[in-house]
Amino acid sequence: MKLEEIFREAEKLPQGDRAKLAATLLQTLPVTLADEDDGIAEARRRSRELDEQPELGCSWEDVKKSLGR
């Protein structure tokens, strides 16, 4: 079966099944982010900042409230 055929069949699945399939396929791939990646560097910087100044953070409940949820 060719990739195009698999894709056409997968598109026919209900949304939840497509999401499960996509997640399962993604889990089969190697991690591609490296320490040099800008996003990883930024996440590490923010993590260090919160470790040093925890008062800068906010709870998940506060985040949800600020979004009106």
Image (spheres, helix red, strand yellow):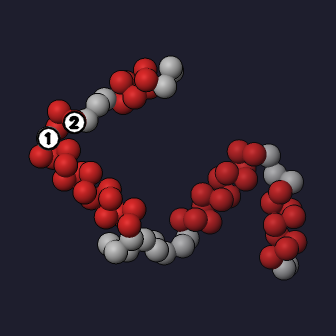
The quarter of the picture where the N terminus appears is: bottom right
Q: Residue at x 54, y 73 (%)?
A: 29
> Compared with residue 69, is residue 49 higher up or lower down, i.e. above or below?
below
What's under tag 2, amino acid-wise?
Leu
Q: Secondary structure at mark 1?
A: loop
In this rendered view, identify the residue nearer to me: 54 or 26.
54
> How many discs mark residues in the rendered view?
2
Q: Residue furthest bottom?
A: 2
Instruction: From the viewer's perspective, tell me whether residue 58 is left or right of residue 2.
Output: left
According to the image, label 2 marks what residue? 56
> Compared with residue 43, is residue 56 higher up or lower down, i.e. above or below?
above
Q: Residue at x 65, y 59 (%)?
A: 22
Instruction: From the viewer's perspective, tell me whether residue 66 is left or right of residue 27.
Output: left
Crowd class of label 1 (few under 14; some 14 to 19; many from 20; radius 10 Å) = few
According to the image, label 1 marks what residue? 53
Disc 1 to disc 2, C-alpha distance: 6 Å
> Hey, which quadrant is residue 8 in on the image?
bottom right
| Place of residue 17 in the rendered image (x, y in percent of width and height, measured from the top left) | 72, 49
Mark 1 and mark 2 residues within 8 Å of each other at the beta carbon:
yes
> Compared with residue 31, is residue 68 higher up or lower down, i.e. above or below?
above
> Hey, which quadrant is residue 34 in on the image?
bottom left
Q: Residue at x 15, y 46 (%)?
A: 51
Instruction: From the viewer's perspective, tell me whether residue 27 is left or right of residue 54.
Output: right
